[in-house]
Image: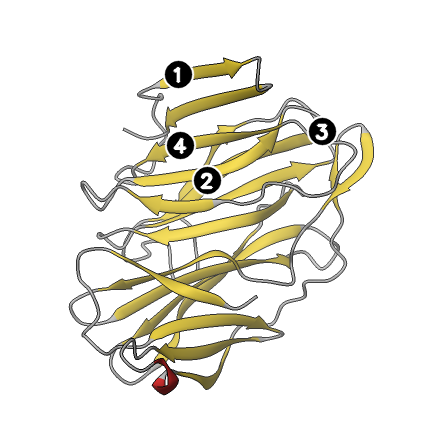
Amino acid sequence: SLLPADCDGDSLPAAGTPNFLLERETGALRLWEASVDWNNTSNSTITNMGTIAVQPYSNSGLSIGQPGTSQKLDNLADRLMYRVQYRKFPTYEVMVANHTVNASGTGQAGVRWYELRNTGSGWGIHQQGTYAPADGDHRWMGSIAMNANGDIALGYSVSGASTYPSIRVAGQNAGAPAGLGVLDIPETSVLEGTNSQTGVSRWGDYAMMSFDPSDDTTFWFTTEYTSGGWNWKTRIAHFNLGVSVPQEPEANFTADDTNPALGQTVNFNDQSLYT
């Protein structure tokens, strides 16, 4: 599960800076540097830069259930989840990443997330945390990103014994006002599920948290969900973390484009979570 860093924002790294790749290992993140010589590709290199220790965790013993069925959903806890985001600030570089862990030790899936920083002397952990509220529901299939203000948004799937598979987001205001490793923006629902997925264990392939290049602060999150069985749909949401109290949606609309001849239906849903 080697993921390349995906560069965001207008401030780009200096020419010749290698791309960074992260890999999840037990108790650590392994860092690689990749440099490509496009004039002579045989000069290209990928270098193992060693590991960065993280807080202990377990990714075994997970069993993500749903209401009314014995069908479990795949947790994909053996890998980092898309994306590893890179962003350059005036005095440091940032990468954010996430993966799924056994948060409670009793099988509750939670999202382990990291902010790595490089202030000029190499990469290290700036903050890390595991997001797993005490309601016992599973949170997994995460995607994380940071905007130009330094706000962090985390989107993920949620499911449990009495919670149909759903889509939610949480976040952290810039500067971590509630402390490093703590998401102070309360969890907000993008979509509350109404059915369990049966007949197949794959789920939500895949989530992505990004931002709007027009302002470099508005987040966009997309992921898949089910309306029952193998009938997947895609939900797209945009929101700002300028306030910590959820507001009424600015917009909530659906467009359907059905072509019976091809047997295809396209659904588009958009919901702004914060004003």
The three-letter code of the residue at mark 4 reads Ala
Marks 4 and 2: which is nearer the front? 4
> Are the residues flagged by discs 1 and 4 in contact, CB closer than 8 Å?
no
Type of colouring = secondary structure
Answer above or below: position of 32 versus 77.
below
Residue 17 image position (x, y, % from top left): 26, 77
33 shown above or below 201: below
Front-most of 16 and 241? 16
- The first of marks 3 and 2 along the sequence is 2
Measure the C-alpha gap from mark 3 to mark 2. Answer: 20 Å
Residue at x 33% of width, y 72% of height: 117
Q: Specify which label sits upstream in the sequence, 3 or 1.
A: 3
Q: How many marks?
A: 4
Left or right of residue 269, residue 118 in this image: left
Is residue 115 placed above or below 144 in the rendered structure? below
Q: Dot 4 corresponds to which residue?
A: 237
Indicate the amino acid at tag 1: Phe
What element does badge 2 sit on?
strand
Image quarter hosting the C terminus? top left
Label 3, secondary structure: give it. Answer: loop
Q: Which mark is residue 253?
A: 1
Disc 1: CA contacts within 10 A as few (<14), some (14-19) or many (>=20) = few
